[in-house]
Image (cartoon, helix red, strand yellow):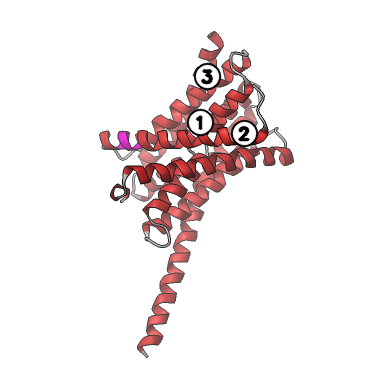
């Protein structure tokens, strides 16, 4: 699949906009069900996104997925789906509200689970 | 706050913001890689840090209901900056550095992202507060002259 740079950019943008809407809806649903101070919505979104990007990377390395499709799905959809800015903002807000321990748990669990999920995705994709 | 907007309006704001944010990241990432190389992931690092700074700045203005209303907040913060910054590429980039044996790069990428990201949020917040305070001071000075 060979696309011109312009078409590729537009498709990446569309994939990213769908990722952003998925994140917004999923975040709202989870926030409505879990009445917790820790933003589990963003945590779940970032960890599942990290798993999926590892899986896509492994599938592309094995030539099961074209690099163009990897760019659309990983840079586009998953890039729009996961977020770093909200993570930092939410973690800092927890400290401001006096929940320093919860803030630490939030940052630590996002990074530990996120890196582990990416590794797991790469390993699982390698087995396929 | 955002619940007063119709779902369709909320989703369009996030959709449009997400489209622009993703394209900006895609384009900026290629630009940064062309200038600074692919050795250390400068592109995602710089994108994430600037996004965190802007998000805190906009959220502070929105909380004070200054310039930023609910729709703009959804467009800029949830849509644009949410899609502009990314966690998945950060996680994958870090794992790739670590599995390639570049432990120092992997650790510095991880901790720099976290530490500078939090610092960026604090700076964005302070910047927003400074602008709000200036505006308040300006408004009260104006009303003082009017009273005289």
> Dot 3, how many residues are within 10 Å of its Cα: few (below 14), some (14-19), or many (20+)?
many
Q: x, y percentage for residue B45?
A: 59, 40
**Which chain does the numbered disc 2 sit on?**
A
Q: CA distance from mark 2 to mark 3?
A: 25 Å
Label placed on residue A7? 2
Give residue B138's quadrant in the image. bottom left
Mark toward the viewer: 2 or 3: 2
Q: x, y percentage for residue A96?
A: 37, 50
Disc 3 is placed on an element classified as helix
State the residue position of label 3. Answer: A55
Image-based side of A65 in relation to A42, left or right: right
In magenta stretch: residue A10: no
User: Which quadrant, please, contains the N terminus of chain A?
Assistant: top right
Name which of mark 1 and mark 3 comes first in the sequence: 3
Q: Nearer the viewer, residue B117 or B147?
A: B147
Disc 1 is placed on an element classified as helix
Q: CA distance from mark 1 to mark 2?
A: 16 Å
**Which chain does the numbered disc 1 sit on?**
A
Name which of mark 1 and mark 2 comes first in the sequence: 2
Q: x, y percentage for residue B62?
A: 40, 56
Image-based side of A65 in relation to A89, left or right: right
Q: Which residues are magenta?
A: A27-31
Image-based side of A66 in relation to A38, left or right: right
Name which of mark 2 and mark 3 comes first in the sequence: 2
Label placed on residue A77? 1
């Amino acid at each position: 699949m060979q696309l011109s740079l312009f078409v590729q950019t537009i498709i990446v943008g569309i994939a990213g906009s769908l990722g952003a809407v998925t994140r917004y809806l999923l975040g709202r649903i989870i926030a409505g069900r879990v009445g917790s101070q820790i933003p589990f919505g963003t945590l779940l979104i970032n960890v599942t996104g990290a798993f999926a990007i590892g899986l896509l990377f492994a599938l592309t390395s094995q030539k099961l997925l074209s690099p163009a499709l990897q760019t659309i799905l990983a840079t586009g959809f998953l890039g729009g789906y996961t977020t770093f800015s909200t993570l930092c903002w939410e973690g800092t807000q927890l400290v401001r509200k006096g929940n320093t321990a919860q803030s630490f748990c939030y940052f630590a669990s996002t990074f530990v689970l996120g890196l582990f999920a990416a590794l797991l995705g790469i390993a699982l994709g390698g087995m396929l | 706050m955002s619940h007063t907007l119709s779902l369709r309006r909320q989703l369009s704001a996030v959709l449009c913001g997400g489209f622009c944010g993703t394209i900006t990241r895609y384009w900026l990432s290629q630009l940064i890689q062309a200038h600074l190389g692919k050795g250390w992931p400068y592109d995602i690092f710089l994108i994430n840090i600037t996004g965190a700074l802007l998000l805190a700045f906009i959220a502070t203005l929105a909380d004070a209901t200054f310039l930023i209303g609910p729709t703009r907040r959804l467009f800029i913060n949830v849509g644009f900056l949410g899609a502009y910054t990314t966690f998945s590429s950060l996680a994958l980039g870090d794992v790739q550095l670590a599995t390639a044996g570049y432990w120092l790069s992997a650790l510095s990428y991880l901790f720099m992202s976290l530490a500078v990201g939090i610092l960026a949020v604090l700076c964005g917040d302070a910047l927003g507060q400074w602008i709000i305070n200036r505006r308040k001071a300006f408004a009260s000075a104006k009303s003082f002259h009017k009273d005289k």
